[in-house]
Amino acid sequence: MSTEENAPKNFGTLTAGHGTSQQRELAITAVVRADYADHRLITIMGIEDGSIVVTVESPATTGRNPHQQMWLSRESLIGILCTTHMFLSSTGSDLMQLVKDAAGDETIRYSFGGTKPDPGEGLALDAPTEAE
């Protein structure tokens, strides 16, 4: 493999410490986006320093905050995921059913690498696996 093939990918940059003496540009090294039936766009970005940015964009018509963002260490994101799983389990919630409910039309459109999800590509939640 060439050095170019081994180089981390760059999907743009984020500015850390904007407007301070510690301001610096950090490369976005990985991106996954999911577009849900209600047009909620969830983006997860890997950052060159190992941190992860999670954003949720909602249409103004939903009445929800149009843009939420968390910039977390990998360990904090894993902690949130584990605690969320524990919370849902302790309340008797079925995680897969919640995902299906959030999907609406049973398709969540994913993209990898920084482009908006293609409406023709997606993950059908009830699609049979090879084992079935």
Image (cartoon, rainbow, N blue to C red):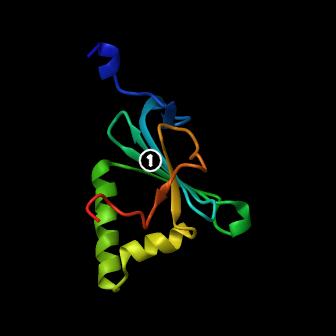
Mark 1 surroundings within 10 Å by alpha-carbon count, few (fewer than 14), some (14 through 19), many (20 or more): some
In the rendered image, the vertical position of residue 9 relative to residue 94, given as above or below: above
* Image point (29%, 61%), residue name: 79
Whether residue 80 sits left or right of residue 57 in the image: it is left
Q: Give coordinates of residue 71: x percent, y percent.
A: 43, 49
What count of labels does the image hold? 1
* Image point (61%, 50%), residue name: 119
Q: Report helix, strand or loop for mark 1.
A: strand
* Image point (44%, 65%), residue name: 125
Quadrant of the image containing the N terminus: top left
In the rendered image, the vertical position of residue 126 relative to residue 48, given as above or below: below
Q: Give coordinates of residue 82: x percent, y percent.
A: 28, 66
Q: Say which of 118 and 72 sits in front.
A: 118
Amino acid beneath label 1: Val
Query: In this view, which residue lies farthest toward the right?
Result: 61
Q: Say which of 39 and 19 sits in front.
A: 39
In the rendered image, the vertical position of residue 97 relative to residue 3, given as above or below: below
Whether residue 88 sits left or right of residue 68 in the image: it is left
To which residue does mark 1 refer?
A: 53
Quadrant of the image containing the C terminus: bottom left
Q: Say which of 50 and 113 sits in front.
A: 113
Query: In this view, which residue lies farthest toward the bottom?
Result: 92
* Image point (34%, 56%), residue name: 77
Q: Give coordinates of residue 99: x percent, y percent.
A: 45, 69
